[in-house]
Image: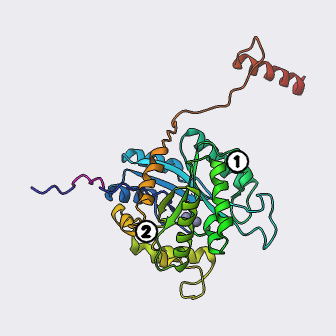
Amino acid sequence: MENKNPAPKKSGVGFTHLHVHSHYSLLDGLAKIDELLDRAKELGMDSLALTDHGVLYGAIEFYQKAKERGIKPIIGCEMYVAPNGLAMKRAKIDDVRHHLILLAKNEKGYKNLLQLVSIAHLEGFYYKPRIDKELLKKYSEGLIGLSACVEGEVPSLVLSGKMDEAEKSAREYESILGKGNFFLELQHHPKFANQKIANSGIIEISQRSGIPLVATTDMHYVHLADAPIQDILLCVQTNRKVSEQNRMNLMDFELYMRSPEKMLEDFADIPEAIENTMRVAEMCNLEIELGNIKLPRFEVPDGFTPETYLRKLCDVGLAERYG
Ligand SMILES: [Zn+2]
Ligand SMILES: [Zn+2]
C-alpha cells in the first residue's frame, strides 16, 4: 500500500538558504515561521537561516520550531549600516544606508547580535535601526557577514562603477569580521538587469581578494504564487496603490523559497557559491539556553545573605520614612 505521508527526502543537493525574511520584516516579508520551516523540510533542507530586517523578533520562535522539526536554526539579521556613523541623522544625507547580513556562529555571536540590534534601535535609529562599522568592530566576535542584496555596500559600489572602492569595502568587512567570516553574496534575478552587473563585479572582487562567494535568494515569501500578496504589503508600507506604475516593486525578483535543485541550476556556472552555503551552515552552531530565568547577580556585603541584607535595607528605609 502506498504511504500517504512519506518522510520528506533529504535533498541530494547540499544547499542552505542564508538570507531569509519572515513576516517579522514588517510590511515586507510575508512568510510565517511555520510555513518557512515546513517548506524547507519539504524541499529536503536540514538547516535554514532567519535574517529579518533590523530585528530579531522571530529568533526564539524560529529557534524552537526549527529544533522541533529537526532543522538546524541559523539566527541572523539583515542590518542597516549607516555610512556616516550611527549618530548622524541629517535629512536627505543620512537616509542612505547599506544592508549587511550577519549570522550568529555561536552564543558569543548571538549575544553580540543582540547588542548590535538593541543599540541600532536605541542610538542608531533614523527611519530604520542602524549600526555602523565602529560598532560592528566592537561586537564582531562570533559573527559571519554576507554582503547582502544590491543595497549592500559592496554591490552598491559595483553598480556605481567603483570597483576599487567595492574591493576595499569587501576587504574592510573581512578584516572587521575576521578572515573566513565574510562572504560575497550572489543572487539570481534574471529580470533585474542590475543584478547581472552586480554579480559579475562581485565575482571579480572574489577572484581579486580571495573572499568566498555564497548564493542566496533574499527570500520574502514561500511560494512564487505569493508574490502579488507581498506586493500589496509593500504598497501598504510605501503608501502607494497597486495600480500605480512608478513605485517600488519586487515582482521581478521572484523572492520565493527555491529548492536546492533550482538554486544549483540558477548557479550552474558557479557551483562553489552553492557549496559555500553549506560551509556557512556548518560554521553556525548556536545553542540557546531556554527555560532558565537569569537574574543579575547582586553582591551583598560580608556577613549578609541576600535575604538578611534586604531585611536590613528595609529596616533602614522604614526608620527613614516613619521614624
Ligand atoms: Zn537587502
Ligand atoms: Zn533581504
Q: Is residue 304 above or below residue 256?
A: above
- What number is the disc on residue 137? 1
Residue at 53 percent of width and 44 percent of height? 105
Residue 8's spot in the image, x, y percent?
A: 27, 54
The secondary element bearing badge 2 is classed as loop
Instruction: Kindly give the residue lying farthest to the left in the view shown.
Output: 1
Q: Is residue 297 above or below residue 52?
A: above
Report if the beta carbon of the residue with label 1 is closer than 8 angstroms to ligand 1. no
Residue 291 shows in the view: yes
Image-quadrant location for residue 312: top right
Residue at 67 percent of width and 66 percent of height? 164
Residue 189's spot in the image, x, y percent?
A: 47, 74
Report the amino acid beneath label 1: Lys
Disc 2: which residue: 256
Q: Which residues are magenta?
A: 6-11
Left or right for 287, reference 87: left
Crowd band around label 1 with a 10 angstrom C-alpha radius: few (<14), some (14–19), many (20+): few
Of the numbered discs 1 and 2, the one sitting upstream in the chain is: 1
The secondary element bearing badge 1 is classed as helix
Residue toward you, 245 or 85: 85
Left or right for 124, reference 117: right
Does the magenta-highlighted stretch encompass residue 129? no
Q: Are marks 1 and 2 in contact (CB under 8 Å)?
A: no
Residue toward you, 111 or 270: 270
Residue at 58 percent of width and 63 percent of height? 205
